[in-house]
Image (spheres, rainbow, N blue to C red):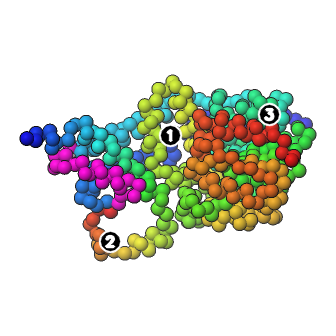
């Protein structure tokens, strides 16, 4: 019969998962920041002319 | 020279005392703190299957998500991430505080002022060795070529029979503030070269690092009779590389920023530093968290302080220089297209007839190797060398001696007549 500990992660595993997540989280930002081209002011302004509440993903996490 | 030039420059120690941590401080703090403050929200996005996950991390995050099987697992992960993220932010802040409070002061080498023109100075390391002219970038101070004992290319060359002459650009004076890059080459570097060649009584080797390498390329094209060999270390030439680089991406943004500055205003140091931050906006956070764990009395900690202070010390870029580099070089690739003017004519690689050594590492994130190696096509007598480290690490890091200094020395000593 399966015990409670078979279904619940150990504390050390959670700690390790949290460390891994944070490293990947920062790496995700680094990768996007260094690979995406920056928008010149005119292009950024043009993009922002789209009303935010009419965008299809309005309210969603970006 | 009939009279000894007077050295009225402020000691670097005084200048560095004004440096307070990574610049611009607010940008670095905002970067780090936002990353860690948002981490908990990142966990929620991972669980919900939303968020923009880069391909480079997507699989690992999916695997991590697969481990979370119960509501309780997710709640515990969220709590642990929040706690650890806050801890990372605190560590970063402590690292910066520890850096600012660190007592290390870089010892200035015993070099004598040989020549001063405007605000620019030429320092002589002395001795009876063969004179060599060393030219740093206009962006950061000269001393990356002479960082500290054991981490100084200038000292290394002196120990091995050379007499280094090192250019110090300093803050641009009234005259230099009106300079373009060509003026620095023709009105500063050329007289410095004349002085060094005069001491030697013959043509001398010239070494240029980073932007200083691009400047010395023009110098060798304009005053080739005084240059016996040209060593270029991470010197950008072709800015239209296939490999993306931050400078190319930032060029249109920098063009807009420059256009908004008051007429003639130089590009402030913090603007230049922002440009460098774009290479990796997370780098400072990782660096300072690592520094926080270091023994402050260790050489590694002193090295960190010396290098970080060097990286954060700089002079405003004269407006014309900023426009030439950001727009002319990065955006329009004038050097690579043969359209970069120094004096009244474009700089042509075929005018450089001396042996040329092009050192450029594959892992350089500031100057792509491809950009530096592009010169090989136009130079009749050039060889390439990969120092096997990063842009700054190759000059002062643990691999500098075997990766750059010793191969450079061997190349300088080789007879290239054949």
Residue B195 shown left or right of residue A58 in the figure:
right
Q: Are marks 2 and 1 on the same chain?
A: no
Label 1 and label 3: CA atoms lie apart by 35 Å
Secondary structure category for the residue under label 3: strand
For residue B123, above or below residue B209:
above
**Magenta segment:** B52-76
Image marks 2 and 1: residues in contact by CB distance under 8 Å: no
Residue that badge 1 annotates: B21
Check disc 3: other Cα within 10 Å, few if <14, some if 14-19, many if 20+. many
Residue with the most extreme top position: B297
Considering depth in this image, is B307 or B401 the residue closer to the camera? Answer: B401
Which residue is drawn at the image coordinates 44% and 43% (left, top)? B285
Q: Position of residue A33 (x, y in %)?
A: 45, 56
| Residue B65 belongs to magenta span | yes
- Residue marked by disc 3: B162
Left/right of residue B21 with respect to residue B137 in the rendered view: left
Which residue is disc 2 drawn over? A52
- Badge 2 density bin: few <14, some 14–19, many ≥20, Cα 10 Å: few
Point 56% across, 51% down: residue: B365
- For label 2, the SS is helix
Q: What kind of element bears circle 1?
A: loop
Between the residue at mark 2 and the residue at mark 1, the CA separation in whole angstroms equals: 38 Å
**Image x and y of residue B338, in percent:** 74, 65
Q: Is residue B291 above or below residue B182?
A: above
């Amino acid at each position: 019969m399966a015990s409670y500990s078979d279904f619940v992660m150990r504390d050390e595993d959670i700690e390790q998962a949290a460390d891994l997540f944070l490293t990947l989280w920062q790496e995700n930002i680094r990768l996007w920041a260094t690979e995406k081209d920056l928008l010149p002011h005119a292009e950024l302004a043009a993009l922002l002319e789209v009303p935010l509440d009419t965008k299809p993903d309005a309210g969603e996490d970006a | 020279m009939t009279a000894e030039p007077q050295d009225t420059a402020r000691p670097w120690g005084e200048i560095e005392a004004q440096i307070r941590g990574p610049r611009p401080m607010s940008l670095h703090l905002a970067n780090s703190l936002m990353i860690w403050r948002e981490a908990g929200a990142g966990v929620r996005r991972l669980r919900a299957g939303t968020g923009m996950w880069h391909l480079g991390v997507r699989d690992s995050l999916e695997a991590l998500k697969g481990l979370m099987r119960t509501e309780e697992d997710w709640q515990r992960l969220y709590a642990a991430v929040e706690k650890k993220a806050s801890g990372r932010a605190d560590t970063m802040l402590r690292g910066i505080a520890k850096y600012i409070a660190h007592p290390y002061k870089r010892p200035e080498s015993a070099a004598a002022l040989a020549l001063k023109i405007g605000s620019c100075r030429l320092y002589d390391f002395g001795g009876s060795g063969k004179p060599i002219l060393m030219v740093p970038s206009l962006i950061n101070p000269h001393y990356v070529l002479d960082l500290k004992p054991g981490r100084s290319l200038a000292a290394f060359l002196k120990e091995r029979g050379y007499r280094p002459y090192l250019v110090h650009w300093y803050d641009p004076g009234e005259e230099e503030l009106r300079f373009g890059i060509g003026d620095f080459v023709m009105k500063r570097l050329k007289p410095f070269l004349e002085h060094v060649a005069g001491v030697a009584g013959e043509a001398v080797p010239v070494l240029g690092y980073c932007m200083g390498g691009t400047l010395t390329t023009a110098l060798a094209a304009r005053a080739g009779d005084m240059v016996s060999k040209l060593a270029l270390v991470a010197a950008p030439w072709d800015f239209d590389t296939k490999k993306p680089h931050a400078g190319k991406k930032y060029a249109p943004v920098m063009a807009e920023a420059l256009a908004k500055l008051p007429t003639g205003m130089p590009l402030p140091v913090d603007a230049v530093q922002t440009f460098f931050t774009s290479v990796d906006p997370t780098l400072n956070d990782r660096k300072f968290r690592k520094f926080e764990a270091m023994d402050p009395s260790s050489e590694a900690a002193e090295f960190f302080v010396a290098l970080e202070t060097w990286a954060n010390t700089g002079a405003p870029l004269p407006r014309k220089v900023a426009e030439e580099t950001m727009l002319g070089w990065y955006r329009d690739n004038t050097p690579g297209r043969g359209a970069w003017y120094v004096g009244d004519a474009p700089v042509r690689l075929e005018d450089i007839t001396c042996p040329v050594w092009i050192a450029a590492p594959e892992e350089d994130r500031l100057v792509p190797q491809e950009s530096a190696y592009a010169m090989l096509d136009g130079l009749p007598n050039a060889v390439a060398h990969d120092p096997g480290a990063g842009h700054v690490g190759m000059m002062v890091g643990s691999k500098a001696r075997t990766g750059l200094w010793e191969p450079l020395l061997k190349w300088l000593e080789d007879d290239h007549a054949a």
